[in-house]
Image: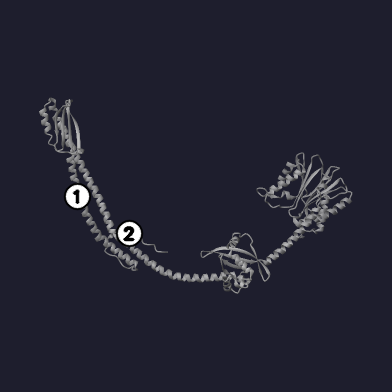
Amino acid sequence: MKNKKLVYNNKSLSKTLSVILIIGVCIVSSIATAFLYSINKTNALEDFEKRNNSIKYQLSISLSEPMWNIDGKGISVIASSYTNDISLVSLDIFSEDMRRLFTYKNPRTHNKKYFNEYSIAIKKDNEHLGIIQIVFSKESLNNKLNNMLRNALLVLILTLITISALTVISFRLLLNKSLDNLMNRASLIGSGDISSNTNNLFKEFLPLIEVLNTMSSKISRQVSLLNENKNNLEITVKDRTSQLLKEKQFIHSIMNSLTSMVLTTDGKQINSINKAFLDYFNIKDEKDFFKHYENKFTDYSNNESISYLMTCIHKEEWINSINDHPDNIHKVEFYMNDCKYIFTITIDKFIFENKELFTIVLTDISELEKIKNKIEEINKHTKESIEYAALIQNSLIPSIDLINVFFTDSFVIWEPKDIVGGDIYLFPQLVNKDECILMMIDCTGHGVPGAFVTMLVKAIEKQIITITNASEEEINPAYILQEFNKEMKSILKQNSSDVKFNAGFDGAIISYNKKDKILKYAGAKVPLYYIINDEIKTIKGDSHSIGYNTSDINYKFTQHEIKIEEDITFYLSTDGFLDQTGGSKGFSYGRKKFKELLLNNYKKSMNEQQDIYLSTLNDYQGNEEKNDDITFIALKP
């Protein structure tokens, strides 16, 4: 830190104090003189007025008798006795009818600005006898006052001269000597002598002496502390230098242990590189690199990779672009010995010694890219296989036209969660052309596992329908569910709870005889909904699933028969629709809202209903993921 320049003025303290004291004395003396003069002036004016009033009163009284008799000689004698007053300028006496009875003019010249003129009535026994007009001059009074003022000022000036002389002499003899002693003490302290004392000073200077003594003591302690800190600082600097050297070696060791190439740059030149960088470009050491780097890579001119890298580093916008988009994956391809290498580039900005630097890390992902490409190829084949499986699964789904042969109107919503799904519905052909069977199956899981179970369900369904067509007995949905349960447990060998694999399905089976107008239903955890006369009714399926290792192989399912009436509509749905999460709170759609949705729309055509149910579910789902496969069937006999 630079020393601040000492700022001072050239004024003398003793002179300044003398001037202040003299000015103060002048002001006080002037005020006192002015006050005394004002009092004397006021008294002189009061005396002047009293004397004038006395003359006017005496004159008016003494003239009242001669004026009564109109005695001219008497008036003249009385008035003439007052003309000896030096302040009288003129005196005129008039009768009642304004005849001049007496007049007097002072022959001496008077200044008119000092005139005081009065008119006095002469009365006797309340009778008006005449008027006295008299003029007085204050000139003599003013002369007297001026003499008084001159004398006062003369005394004031002599007093001030005496006091000023005494003040200057006092300050020079007393103050300057004390200040010189203090300055000498301060000078000695400034030069390093903090042991000297100051004597023969007035008690008013004791606070300054105490300040100097305190400052001397503090300076002594600070000098001691500085010497101590100097020694400690030297030790600290040595320790810190050793620590920084160790940290530098540690960081250098870490950089060299990395398999990724690491270099630092300011966007204009490279500042450091690690061992992986040297090894990749087959460079001897850092000195060799920087030597050729300064010489424009004369020995590396055939190395396209390093030339490309150096060109990129010199383009600072390239570095900033990568640094500004850290979430993106930045790749670059290098070629070495006719082999292609792929590197990811990450850049981090930091400040070192008030300088902005970048750390560039190049990680070799060549093998990962090969693995990634292999995985992408496998995924492509897998996706193609699944898409082909979806074609097979879709081929098993019956046409809506087959269903509409038996029903006046219907719709089917079938949406797998993935490309293939675990939901399937079947509509097999029967020998009796008046009867039909509709099976809606929700298999274990979804996606590929669920799709495999649907293939098994389709195989078992063909076997059961073949037996049913060959039999002369009535169609029995409950019996068909029982046969599904036995066959699946047998084929999947799920006859005990110890089996690790556990597969099965929930579902519902409907048979309908359009000639007899009878609909039969049996369900495994899947209910049947139907609406008639503006009322929705529910037939719950049995609380027993099909084919699982916990399913009872001898379980007897319940069959329900419904006599078809006019304007009746049936609905079946797997749990995909009801369990879909969404809405403002993320809850499942639920059975209550599902029933309300059916009841509010069942009178519309099946096409309209299908559109409403799909849009309602999509709106409710919002941004939530689809939870499960969805199968939703509506039938109107």
Q: Is residue 590 visible?
A: no
Residue 615, x across and y down, in percent = 71, 46
Q: Quadrant of residue 447?
A: bottom right
- Which disc, if any, is residue 9? 2
Residue identifier under label 1: 154
Element under disc 2:
loop
Q: Nearer the viewer, residue 286 or 302?
A: 302
Q: Amino acid at mark 2?
A: Asn
Tell me: 109 left or right of 252: left
Tell me: 14 left or right of 395: left
Q: Quadrant of residue 420?
A: bottom right
Tell me: 603 left or right of 221: right
Decide: is 327 above or below 410.
below
Q: Is residue 109 visible?
A: yes
Q: Amino acid at mark 1?
A: Leu
Q: Nearer the viewer, residue 154 or 65?
A: 154
Decide: is 564 above or below 8.
above
Q: Could you tell me which residue is drawn at 45 percent across and 71 percent down?
A: 234
Q: Could you tell me which residue is drawn at 26 percent across and 52 percent down?
A: 23
Label 1, label 2: how far apart the Cα atoms are: 37 Å
Q: Quadrant of the C terminus?
A: top right
Residue 595, x across and y down, in percent = 73, 44
